[in-house]
Amino acid sequence: MRAPEGSSHEARKRVLSGFRPTGPMHIGHLVGALENWIRLQETHDCFFAICDWHALTSEYADTSSIKDYVLDMALDWLAAGLDPEKCTIFVQSHVPEHAELHLLLSMIVPVTWLERVPTYKEQQQQISNRDLTNYGFLGYPVLQAADILIYRAELVPVGEDQLAHLELCREIARRFNSLYGPVFPEPQALTTRVPRVPGTDGRKMSKSYGNALNLGDPIEETRERVLRMVTDPARKTRQDPGNPDICPVYDLHKAFSDRTTIDLVNVECRRAGIGCIDCKTYLLKHLEPVLRPIQERRSRLARERDRVREILAEGARRARAEATRTMESVRAAMKMDTRLPG
Ligand code: SF4
């Protein structure tokens, strides 16, 4: 059971993290984030947000799938092992205080701070099939700062590509505290080394490339896709030696297989001692036992969608209690608590 208020649970450092519900979760998310979250929920006071408002910053023109992705994301998280008794799982828009804090912070953030965030220009250039000149996209890091600061989170698990956003969040916290007095702790990055998990075509695993192995895909489909994965192109025949260092299948071995298998592949690939189908079969021997229990739990949970909605409602209740407390301090610090006498 979740520890009662005032117990030692309260002394645990608070962690905030989240994902945008823009598509199914895949094995890259499992290795890159979820496995870390599952460990953190044992030792930290964790808040995990399904950031549906963030999804809007790029998906505003077609919102038809966001609602389904929200529930799917909750299913994936629970199936992977997040335990609502040990952590708080909620949907961002169920806690409207995020929007209020976003608005207040947007008053104190210079536009130049946002324009210099590296991902702002990069993504505008890379994502050519959407118009990302909207105000919400520019303000994305301010909403993200609000998501973190509203829980007074001390730690934020981040990948290298998110460090600039977190630094901006720290800058925003400092600016708020210097203008109105100390309210927010400056959150620290919690970086963990995660193995590279490429997609089936060797590029970064991503739903937009169609190369992802999703947690919710049937095992048979995953098996077929792994067997068709690209390998070292130098191995045209079974007799050609290969180089595992440039093969995406080897990267997946490093993420999922045991040491003995990794070492065996490393040696036998180079001297054509094994073929690529053998190699992929070894990988599946290690990948399937990870995915099968997730899928079984996922199918069970998918039949109990009301229970999942209850978990999200309870998560929102807990999150909202924290967010309300922070907003009282924020309004008081800003002298905007005009509903109070005095
Ligand atoms: S044997 Fe394995 S590591 Fe070597 S090229 Fe084939 S799939 Fe890649």
Image: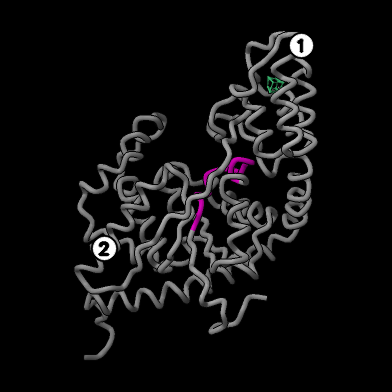
Q: In this view, does 162 lie above or below 149?
A: above
Quadrant of the drawing holding the N terminus = bottom right
CB at mark 1 closer than 8 A to ligand 1?
Answer: no
Residue 196 locus on image (x, y percent): 57, 36
Image quarter for ligand 1 equals top right
Q: Can residue 310 be seen in this view?
A: no
Residue 332 locus on image (x, y percent): 27, 79
Q: Is residue 334 above or below residue 62?
A: below
Badge 1 crowding class, 10 Å Cα cut-off, few under 14, some 14 to 19, many 20 or more, is some
Residue 181 locus on image (x, y percent): 23, 74
Q: Going from the N terminus, do you reach mark 2 or mark 1 first?
A: 2
Residue numbers of the magenta segment: 17-29
Dot 2 amino acid type = Arg
Judge left or right: residue 141 versus residue 68: left
* 19 within the magenta span: yes
Judging by the rendered image, the residue that carries numbered circle 1 is 238
Residue 69 locus on image (x, y percent): 58, 49
Residue 174 is tagged as: 2
Residue drawn at (64%, 11%), measured in percent from left and top?
234
Residue drawn at (61%, 45%), measured in percent from left and top?
31
Dot 1 amino acid type = Arg
Judge left or right: residue 270 versus residue 96: right
Q: Is residue 288 above or below residue 297?
A: above
- Between the C-alphas of marks 2 and 1, the distance is 60 Å
Residue drawn at (55%, 52%), measured in percent from left and top?
67
The one nearer the camera, 186 or 272, is 272
